[in-house]
Image: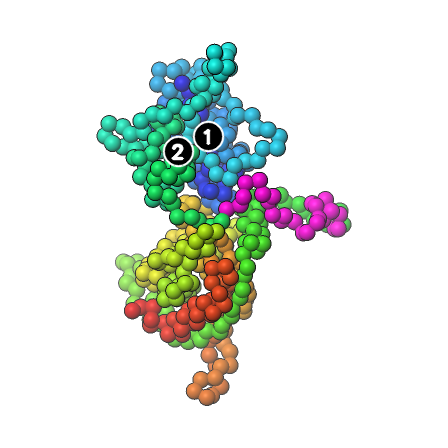
Amino acid sequence: MPTNILMPALSPTMEKGNLAKWLKKEGDQIKSGDVIAEIETDKATMEVEAVDEGVLAKIVVPEGTADVPVNDVIAVIAGEGEDAKAVGAAGAAPSPKKADEKPKAEAPKQEEKAAPAPATTNGSGQTASQQAAAPQPQQSTNGAGRVFASPLARRMAKEGGLDLAAIQGSGPHGRIIERDVKAAVEGGTAKKAQPGAPAAQPGAPAPKLAPAGMSDEIVKKMFEPGSFEEVPHDGMRKTIARRLTEAKQTIPHFYLTVDCDIDALLKLREQVNASASKDKDGKPAFKVSVNDMVIKALALALVRTPGANVTFTESSMLHHKHADISVAVAIPGGLITPVIRKADVLTLSGIANAMKDFAARAKDRKLKPEEYQGGTSAVSNLGMFGIKDFVAVINPPQSSIIAVGMGEKRAVVKNGEIVIGDVMSVTISCDHRAMDGAKGAELIAAFKQLIENPMGMLV
């Protein structure tokens, strides 16, 4: 039976994707694990792997097509013994949607069997199509004990601490898919995942992104015709607008600002970079930036401040053992926030090299979802643009974010005398649900202590 390849959900927030490129052509033999296409999401360009084997009989959605809804059929694979030309001629069409149906925010990343043709009803009133469409549980492991599961199901199980071998698959050939993992969690048949950040309730209205009470047409009428160029929002801008609107509407922010003396930090940075080994071409093994040291200081401050390294959920507070720091990186059309995992135990050179890699791949939109999702706190640094100080918006599920201004020469008092020193203003935004003012003050004070006494980052 032919197998439909569906537009996968490559992240929990993905609703549509752009089919950037097909890496296989009609008539090519497909093996499980082959990379067959590249999909552009709102944040990155991802590779799609085949799950079933066969011949690529029909490409339903040509490359270059934008805004393909999640779970729509993008291609058809002819199975073993099937006539690929006949399957390709028959084609496949996405399931019809109701006019008021909204795309799902998260859909299974897997391939499903093509829907069979309608048939007459049986004695129970079901058509043969309905019987064929009903899930048929199968064994989800092969003889060697390998568990067959879609990439999304594997990720969900890993994050939730579930044993895939204990879950019955209902996908093609008994493959475990998203609904199977959800059923295991909801039915209590496996260890439940820790609750994440509060999710929007089904059917809840989306936050309004335009100026309050103003439609697109009203806003446009406020400007002289021909005085502007209208550029439609791309997926990244829509996602940024939606998530940050939700954050400001649902997270009670409070802000705390400190001025940090960075004379000692700049001297230590110079010494650390001078110690870097060089290759035969004289290129240093690493180059630590002030931002790398800020990341390290924030991570250490979090683990040294009990009650601040947390994530708020509707039912509990998640206290983290390590500090995963999200870092805002500007890319064409928006920004992305790669996460430095366990930054509290990484060396400064390790953080520097990780950020160099993330920044390069972020600009090409090659980051994987697990590389920019999550995080316990975040760093947003606009100092390189000459910004003295600012406040940043918290990005859920994080409970805080620091906004870093530029380092500049200022008159400061040292040992009772006015001298010139290098000073950097830093403002922390805190989620008042997760921590109170005193705890936020304790966290930013610990950060300031590490910035002004940077040798503490090395021991």
Q: Is residue 430 visible?
A: yes
Q: Which residues are magenta?
A: 199-223
Q: Looking at numbered disc 1 in the image, what kind of residue is underneath it?
A: Leu
Q: Which comes sooner in the sequence, label 2 or label 1?
A: 1
Report, in whole angstroms, how far the alpha carbon at label 2 lies from the one at label 1.
Answer: 18 Å
| Neighbours of disc 2 within 10 Å: few (<14), some (14-19), many (20+) | some
Looking at the rendered structure, which numbered label has been put on residue 155? none
User: Which image quarter: residue 217?
Assistant: top right
Callout 2, which amino acid?
A: Asp
Give the residue pinned by disc 1: 6
Quick check: 267 above or below 36? below
Q: Residue at x 43, y 53 (%)?
A: 316
Q: Is residue 196 above or below residue 92?
A: below
Dot 1 surroundings within 10 Å: few (below 14), some, or many (20 or more)? many
Q: Secondary structure at mark 2?
A: helix
Furthest residue toward left: 144
Residue at the spot of label 2: 180
Q: Which residue is pictured at 54% across the width and 40% down the height?
A: 202
> In the image, is residue 159 above or below residue 175?
below
Residue 67 horizontal/vertical position (percent): 55, 36
**Magenta segment, prevailing SS (helix, strand or loop):** loop
Q: Is residue 397 magenta?
A: no
Element marked by disc 1: strand
**Left or right position of 108 against 173:** right
Near-viewer residue (6 or 305): 305
- Residue for point 63% across, 48% down: 208
